Amino acid sequence: MKKRRVLMELRDVWRTYTLRKGTEVNALRGLSLKIYQGEMVAIIGPSGSGKSSAMYIIGALDKPTKGKAFLKGQDITRFHQNHLAMMRRREIGFVFQSYNLIPEYTAVQNVWMPLLFEDVPKDEREARAKKILTDLGLGHRLDHKPPEMSGGEQQRVAIARALINNPKVILGDEPTGNVDTKTGEEIIAILKKLHKKGKTVILVTHDPRIASHCQRKIHIIDGKVSQKGGKK
Amino acid sequence: MLKDYFALAVQSMRHRHIRSWLTMLGIVVGVAAIVSLIALGQGLENSINEEFEKIGVDFITIMPGSSGGVPGMGFGAAKLEDGDVRVIERIKEVDIVSPMMTSVEKVTYGNEERYTYVSGMVADDVVDMYFNKKAYQIVEGRVPRATDRWKAIAGYKVSKDFFGKALKPGAKVEIKERDFKIVGIMEEIGNSQDDTQFLIALEDAKIIYDREDYDVIMVVPKKGQDAEEVAEKIKKELEDYRDEEDFQVFTSKQMLESFNSVLGIVQVILVGVAAISLIVGGIGIMNSMYTSVLERTKEIGILKAIGATNNHILSIFLVEAGMMGAGGGIVGVLIGMGIGKIVEIAAVEALGTTYLKVCFGPELIAFSIGFAFVVGCLSGLLPARNAANMDPVMALRYE
Ligand SMILES: Nc1ncnc2c1ncn2[C@@H]1O[C@H](COP(=O)(O)OP(=O)(O)OP(=O)(O)O)[C@@H](O)[C@H]1O
Ligand SMILES: [Mg+2]
C-alpha cells in the first residue's frame, strides 16, 4: 500500500450521551481511525454500533467527550464552534439517509443555503446552485420543493448541496438507505465519480454491496474499530 | 446579506401564513389602537390650538360660580350683574368689557321647532372681538350693529340643514315667541354648538329671558397689557366688590393650557392601555416563535450541519420575529388610520364637530412600525437564542 497523506484522524475517541434521567450511553468507546486524502472508505457495522456518532465527529459537527479528532493535522476539539461551522461549510459536505432537505425551500434554495452563510450574493448563489443541480440531471426540478420530488431526486439535491462549496470531503450517512437498489446504484455512481475527481468519500452503510464499491472498510462494533475487519 | 434573511423570513411566514397572521394580530390591535388614539388626540389638539390662535390668546373670561378646578366648570347660585361689569370697566388696563347671556331656547322657523343656543351680546363688542379681527367672518348678510333690535345672526349650520329648508338673511324666525329677522350668517366654526347658535342683542335677550344677570363677561385687555396680570387685577377688584370669590377669572391661554394638559393626560392613559396590548402582542410573538423553534429543531440541525453558525441561526429567527412585529405594525398602522378616519367622519356626522381631525404625521407612522419591529425582535430574542444554542447533533437526530 502506498503511503498516503492522512486527512483525518480520530484518536481514542469516546462519545458519551447523557440522557435526561442522568444515565449515560457510551456511543463511542475509544474509537481510533484514520482517513486518507482522496480515498473512498466505508464505515460499516451493526445498528447502534456508533457509526453516525463517529460520522458527526469526523464531520466537525460534534466534539468527542474524550480523545482527539484531527482534520489536516489540526486538533478540532480545541476549535471554537464558529470555526467548526466554517470548516463544515468549506471542507465537508454531508449527505444523510433521510436527505435532510428543508421542505419549504425549493431545490435551488436548499442547494445554495451553505453559500448564504458564506455571504455569497444571491445571483451567484443561484447560478452556482443551478449549475450543480443541472450537472446532476435535475435541470427540470430546480424550483421543485422536496415533497414534490422522488427519493432519488431528493438525494441528488442533497448531494448538490454537499458539493456547492467544493469541499474536499463528502460524508454520506447511509445515503442509499431510503432508496431502492437501482436508485442506490445511481447515487453510488455519482459518489464514485466524485471520488475519481479527487474527493475523499466516506460512506456509512451496513449494506455489503455498497461497501464493496469502496477501497477500504472500517468495521465498528460497540463504539470501537473491530480488528476482524482488518487493520485500521 | 441581511436582505436574504428578510426574504427567507417572508418565505417562512408565508409557509405558515395562518399562524403568522394570528401571531401578528396582537401587534395589529396594539398598533392600530396607538395610531388612531395618537392621531385623533394630535388632531384634536391641533384644531383646538388653531381655534384659540384665531381669536387670540389674550381674552379674559369671567364666569359666576366657584371653580371646580377646571375652567368653565363653575357651579353655584352666584350671579354676575351690571355692578360687576362696572367694577371691571373701571380698571384702566382693560379695553373691552362685554357681558353676555346664553341659554338654550326654542327657535321656530316656518312651522319647525328646534332647541338651540341663543346668545345675547353687545353688537359693537362682538364686532371688535371677532369680526374685525377676522377670527370669524360673516359669509352672508352683514355683521351685527349697535342699533339692531330684534335682529339675529345665525350660525352656519342654521343656514344649511338645521331646519327642513335653508335659511337666508331676511328670513324670520321666532325665538321664545318673539319675531327676529336674520341679518347675517356666520362662517363654519366646526363645532355644532357654535354652528347652530343665534346671536341677538343683549337688550333683547334680557327681555325674552326676563333676567338681568350675565352668564359670562368677556374682557379684552388694552394693547400691550399682559392678560394674566389683568386677570389677576380683575379677580382682586371683583373680590373686593363681592366680598367673596364666587366667580372665576381665566385667560384663554390658561384655558388652552389646562385643556392641553387634560388632553395630554387622557392621551397618555389611552396610549398606555394600548401599549399594554402591544406587550400582549409581543408575548404572542414569543409564544409563536418558541413553537416554531421547536417545530424546526430538525431544520436547525440541518442548517448547522451545512455550516450555519449560532449567529446565523439567531439572525434567521430574530429577523422572522422582527418581521412579524413590523408586518403587524404596518397592518396596524393602516387599520389605525382607517379607525381614525372613521371616528373623524362619525364625529362630524353624529356630533357635528370638525375638531376631531385625525393627524397622521410621517413620524407617527414610522415610529409605530419601527416600534412594532423592535417589540417583535425583543420578543423573538429568547426563542432565537434557544434555537441558536441548540446542540447540532441533538437537533439533527430530533424527529
Ligand atoms: N442523543 C442520544 N442520546 C442517547 N443515546 C444516543 C443518542 N444518540 C445515539 N445514542 C445511542 O448511541 C448509540 C450509537 O448510536 P448511533 O446513531 O451512532 O449508531 P449507528 O451505528 O449510526 O446506528 P444505525 O445504524 O441504526 O444508524 C446507540 O446505542 C444509540 O442508542
Ligand atoms: Mg446511524
Image: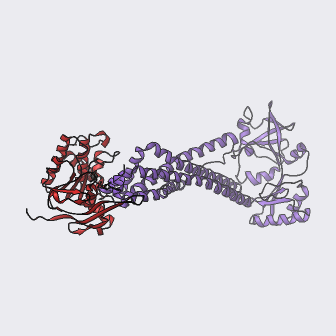
Report whether B82 appears left or right of B374: right
Picture quadrant where residue B196 is located: top right
Whether residue A200 can be seen here: no
Image point (22%, 43%), residue name: A138
Picture quadrant where residue A86 is located: bottom left
Q: Please state, as top left, top right, bottom left or bottom right, where the C terminus of chain A lies in the image.
A: bottom left
Which color is chain B depicted in?
Answer: purple
Q: Total number of numbered labels? A: 0
Residue lying farthest to the top in this orientation = B111
Report whether B139 appears left or right of A207: right
Residue lying farthest to the left in this orientation = A1
Write down which chain is painted red.
A
Q: Please state, as top left, top right, bottom left or bottom right, where the N terminus of chain A lies in the image.
A: bottom left
Question: In this orientation, which residue lies closer to the viewer: B339 or B126?
Answer: B339
- In the rendered image, residue B203, in percent from the top left (x then y), is placed at 88, 47
Question: In this orientation, which residue lies closer to the viewer: B238 or B40?
Answer: B40
- In the rendered image, residue A54, in percent from the top left (x then y), is placed at 26, 59
Report whether B325 appears left or right of B343: left
- In the rendered image, residue B168, in percent from the top left (x then y), is placed at 74, 36
Whether residue B182 can be seen here: yes
Q: Is residue B240 above or below residue A220?
A: below
Question: In this orientation, which residue lies closer to the viewer: B304 or A132?
Answer: B304
Question: In this orientation, which residue lies closer to the viewer: B76 or A168?
Answer: A168
- In the rendered image, residue B374, in percent from the top left (x then y), is placed at 49, 57
Image point (63%, 42%), residue name: B345
Image point (73%, 32%), residue name: B165
Residue lying farthest to the front in this orientation = A228
Report whether B329 appears left or right of A100: right
